[in-house]
Amino acid sequence: MKNSIIILMAVLALAASSCGGSGSTTGRQKEVTLSAAGATFPQPFYNLAFKKYNEAGGPLISYGGIGSGGGIKSLRDQIVDFAATDAYLSDEELAEMPGEVVHIPTCIGAVVIAFNIPGVTELKLTPELLEGIFLGNIKMWNDAQILAVNPGLVIPDMEITVVYRSDGSGTTYIFSDYMTKVSSLWNEQLGTGKALNWPSGIGAKGNPGVAGTIKQSEGSIGYLGFEYAFAQQIPMARIMNSSGFFIEPTLDSFTAAAAAEIPSDTRVMITNSPNPSAYPITSFTWIIMYRELAYGRHSRDAAEAAVSTVKWLTGEEAQAIATSVHYAALPQNAALQAAELLKGITYEGQPVLK
Amino acid sequence: MSGDRITKGLLFLSSLTILLLSAGIVVSLLGGALQAFREFGLRFIISPAWNPTAGSEEYGAMSFIAGTVITSILALIICIPMAFSTSLFIAEYFRGTRTSGILRSLVDLLAGIPSIVYGFWGFYALRPLLVATGLTDQGFGVFTASLVLAIMIVPYATSLSAEIISMVPAELKEAAYSLGATRREVIFSVVIPSARSGIIASFILALGRALGETMAVTMLIGNANVIPKGLFAPGNTMASVIANQFGEASGLKMSALIAVGLLLFLITALVNYLGKLIIKRFA
Amino acid sequence: MELTDNIRRRSRTNNRFRYLVIAGSVITIIPIFLIVGNLAVKGYRQINLAFFTKPAPDTFQAMMAAVNGEIIPGGIANGLTGSLLMVLLASLLAIPLGLMTGIYIYENESKKYARFIRSLTEILQGVPSIILGIIAYLWIVKNITRGYSALAGSVSLTIMMLPLIIRSTEETMRMIPLSIREAAFALGTPYYKMIYKILIPVSFSGLATGVLLALSRILGETAPLMLTALGSPAISFDITRPVSAVPLLIWDFYNDPNMVNLVWSASLFLMVFVLSMNLLARSVASKHKYI
């Protein structure tokens, strides 16, 4: 009994001593710790980038992939330094935030259509086919409509199983945003959103869940983030873009989708891009932060660390890291916009970046 | 005397934590669920609708209530024979032997496997097995989820039951043996009646675990927000839909999810109350 | 002869039941071998010293390793320390509270209030972990630490441990023959001494079971920790800041396209750890068994 009491006190003492202060006030950035939360899609890239930046003298950043919605909530509750989201905040959502929020695009992701059809490695799909398949109107793989777009393809007489995301997700949002633009029937029935009222199919959890389900189920087709299909080597379909070309999902085709006019606050969905070499189902992913960073328990050092991190994230070095792990880099115009926006971030009214 | 009073007072104080916790949880849940109930009224509880499309949002909890109740009860049914026989093995037949110690540790192993791992194993290993038996097309559904749930709750039912059974006083058993009873008869006429409340309590503990299980179920049940059409059809449970959708939800949808959480709380209370009645009937 | 027929029949039923019990037990442990086997086969390769001492790798390292056919570098050190911290804190809170509440319920069974508390405990047991995570988020993350923290994680784990400990304490105490208790009082033992010198030691094995069940349960929890501890790449012991945990790492590995192999290793480790913990505690408890 006595021994246990001694151990108890020792542990309590240890716990109490490690109650560090909130946000170091020394000048060294490396001792600053930041917390951020949000989308799972860019998480591998962010974790890698933050680690490299920390090695180069930047702050230590804890990033939690709890989903875009979780990130937005965390930012709204003012408990993180910045958040990450695959879908930009609507005007209503912006109004709900206690302060002005800035969107900084950091890279480009794409949603690919992966399939598992025995004997088939290449498939071309048009918006009409996507509408038919995912809304459940085209039920068999050897349907005439599919064969019309893929002449000469040997395709078995098999039922189509649609795989969708069971959890609310930015991937679903991006895919549905594209489909709403190209299909009025989709617009009526499902609309755009992070969770939809799917008429049929199987729900799988997370991108890996969709990837795993497609890999294991013959005759299945689903939408998921590019890097998952790539890492698991699942065949991806070539989608017809707005210019009529069937584009294969590659990093360059993703970046091409953003090489157009974007608004100064960067809040735009770049799906169905007018660029003829663009893959049509792409989107920015953003870091969102308050314009005024003196809130909660955030010190000036934390503010400086946060802004310099995000600035580095949109710079050449970080973008090269992004492409090395198969995330598409920002095109020139977006990177410039990001830099502009970062200049406007303040701490107690003074711009953070000198 | 006053020393006793202090002790009693301390014990009472600690019991207050449960009271405060439960009250706090109910209050927080009620606050969040208010919006949904105001919008849909009590119809929310029996409505199987779940349409998150902006502009025509309609939510109802029935699909998930059905899914939760069906999977949990099915899991318990599958679990009872396993847990019962195993706890008898450990605490009666092979009591004190090395075999019993090994078996007990193996069962403890089951409790140590994280629920996501059950989800992964179910997804990557069990599902193809079930598809191979031909019982089910894609392997997702109520049965798969219930099967994995059953395996997950076995340690809860077994561990406690075994403990309780082993604590039945030896004199009672020996008295029965001296009257010429066989082992089985001693078990059914002495051990079980004596340990009854503890055994049932362990099953209720297990059922409670099943009701609230999230990760494993969510990977195997198919996540179809409808009342399951059959044993092998996909469906969804209350805990699973909350876990899946909470991160991205806001406004009315979030309120609906919290309302589902509140209902789960109430259902657990109901199940416990029913269990209490059952125990009373046999006392 | 009626008597011998009767005996023979009863004897047969007896034997049949024995076989049933053995068969049932065997069926119960089949999944264990399936799951463990699966985990072991898929996960053993990644386990080496670095697994325990290095923090989680990044996706580039994992990708390169996959491309070159090597094992992924790094390990789960940040998750190990985070889990340790939070579980320790949660135990410090939950074990004394749980024991005392369980004893209270047992000692005051006749009172309505005690029975009410017991019912509340059972209900609490069934609350899904994600809801407890949401609650801890609202209470601690938003209001107390104003940020994701290990403290919030510990609180959600504490709430999860309490019902298990309380219920098993109470049920175990109930099996103690009243005579032992009465004998202590007859000798003039003060109440508190009776509790910690008689009640607890005698029921130690049952109490240990309850605590073990509770610990096993929380070591593998993910959902509540996502909303409270968040996760962190660093090895940290600051309870007011985000911290990682082994199940959180497992979830991160799962969500990263290149790190799937680590899922199995981390799960294998977690399982082996819980097993060892159980074995150790049981051997200690068996030395203190009085009944």
Image (tube, coloured by chain):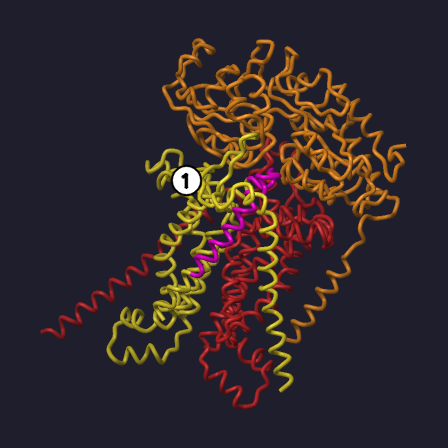
C148 to B185, vertically: above or below = above
Please tell me whether residue C137 belongs to the stretch shown in magenta: no
Q: Quadrant of the N terminus of chain B?
A: bottom right
**Residue position marked by numbered label 1 in the rendering:** B227
Residue C64 versus residue B277 in the image, above or below = above
Q: Could you tell me the amino acid type at mark 1? A: Ile
Q: Residues within 10 Å of mark 1 (few under 14, many from 20)?
A: many
Residue C150: percent from left, percent from top: 68, 53
Q: Chain of mark 1?
A: B
Q: Is residue B147 visible?
A: no
Q: Among the chains, which one is orange? A: A
Q: Nearer the viewer, residue C291 or C45?
A: C291
Task: Spot the residue most to the left.
Answer: C1
Q: Position of residue C251 (x, y in %)?
A: 58, 42
Residue A217: image location, x then y, percent? 43, 30
The range drawn in magenta is B245-273
Quadrant position of residue C214:
bottom right
**Prevailing secondary structure of the magenta residues:** helix
Secondary structure under badge 1? loop
Q: Quadrant of residue B246?
A: top right
- Could you tell whether C74 is left or right of A25 in the image? left
* Residue C122 percent across, percent down from the top left: 50, 61
Reply yes or no: does residue B264 show up in magenta: yes
Question: What shade has chain B been given?
Answer: yellow
At a point 73% along the width and 26% down the height, the residue shown is A319
Residue B138 appears in the figure:
yes
Which chain identifier belongs to the red chain?
A: C
